[in-house]
Image (cartoon, rainbow, N blue to C red):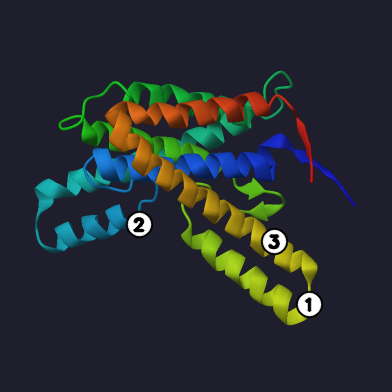
């Protein structure tokens, strides 16, 4: 039986946002200092290593994006709490608008000395996205990182095959669809960044704009 979901929780929107997530990871790695700004595990590990080695001057380099990510989560929750009952515009559209504004700014910050600023901004942007878009097609899914999706998708496929459960197989394929979209985004990011340099991030801006417009359709049938 078909049922309606919010467009913000549809598989289509999840795929677009996962493409954005993969694109931004490729962008920051290729043109913004060889870092992955989407997830903070690496930064936390490097922060710990530098603390252990007494390299306290380097700690701030990893602490700032971690704090920016945390701030993004806080702001996403604040927007949700204050604007969840807004009937004119979905609160998640406001999050997308914030993302678009910050990515537009990044497109005009030169590489080199500005890379740290851009990586902090993108960490903030990814936190907004991962906190706000957690349900895709009825599944708990992240659109800016893949580890959890890989675990959950593989688990669902195993259970589906073992128990001959088509619903679990479908869930597993949803997770793998998001992973595939992330990979497509990374490929796009690698190709476009080599062509457009720092301004390639405007491609992610356009994808977010498409998501913003799609969300005016409040329901999606799955």
Residue sticking out furthest to the bottom: 162
Which residue is disc 1 drawn over? Answer: 164
Residue 73: tell me if it is visible. Answer: no
Q: Earlier in the sequence, mark 3 or mark 2?
A: 2
Q: Give the number of the disc on residue 41.
A: 2
Report how far apart the C-alphas of labels 1 and 2 lie in the structure: 36 Å
Mark 1 falls on what kind of element? loop
Mark 2 falls on what kind of element? helix
Residue 30: x and y in percent read: 27, 43
Mark 3 falls on what kind of element? helix
**Residue 51 relative to residue 165: left or right:** left
Residue sticking out furthest to the right: 1
Which residue is disc 3 drawn over? Answer: 171
Report how far apart the C-alphas of labels 1 and 3 lie in the structure: 13 Å
> Mark 3 Cα within 10 Å, few/some/many (few <14, many 20+)?
many
Residue 203: x and y in percent read: 44, 29
Q: Earlier in the sequence, mark 1 or mark 2?
A: 2
């Amino acid at each position: 039986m078909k049922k309606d979901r919010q467009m913000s929780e549809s598989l289509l929107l999840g795929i677009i946002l996962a493409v954005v997530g993969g694109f931004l990871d490729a962008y920051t790695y290729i043109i913004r200092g060889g870092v992955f700004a989407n997830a903070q595990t690496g930064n936390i590990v490097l922060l710990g290593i530098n603390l252990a080695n007494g390299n306290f001057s380097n700690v701030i380099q990893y602490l700032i994006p971690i704090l920016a990510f945390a701030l993004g989560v806080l702001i996403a929750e604040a927007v949700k709490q204050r604007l969840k009952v807004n009937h004119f515009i979905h609160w998640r559209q406001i999050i997308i608008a914030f993302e678009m504004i910050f990515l537009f700014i990044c497109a005009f910050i030169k590489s080199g000395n500005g890379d740290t600023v851009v990586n902090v901004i993108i960490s903030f942007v990814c936190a907004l996205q991962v906190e706000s878009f957690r349900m895709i097609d009825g599944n708990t899914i992240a659109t800016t990182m893949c580890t959890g999706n890989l675990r959950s998708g593989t688990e669902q496929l195993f259970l589906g095959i073992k128990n001959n459960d088509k619903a679990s197989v479908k869930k597993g394929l949803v997770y793998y669809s998001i992973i595939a979209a992330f990979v497509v985004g990374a490929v796009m990011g690698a190709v476009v960044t080599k062509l457009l340099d720092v301004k390639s991030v405007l491609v992610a801006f356009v994808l977010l704009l498409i998501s913003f417009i799609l969300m005016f359709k409040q329901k999606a049938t799955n």
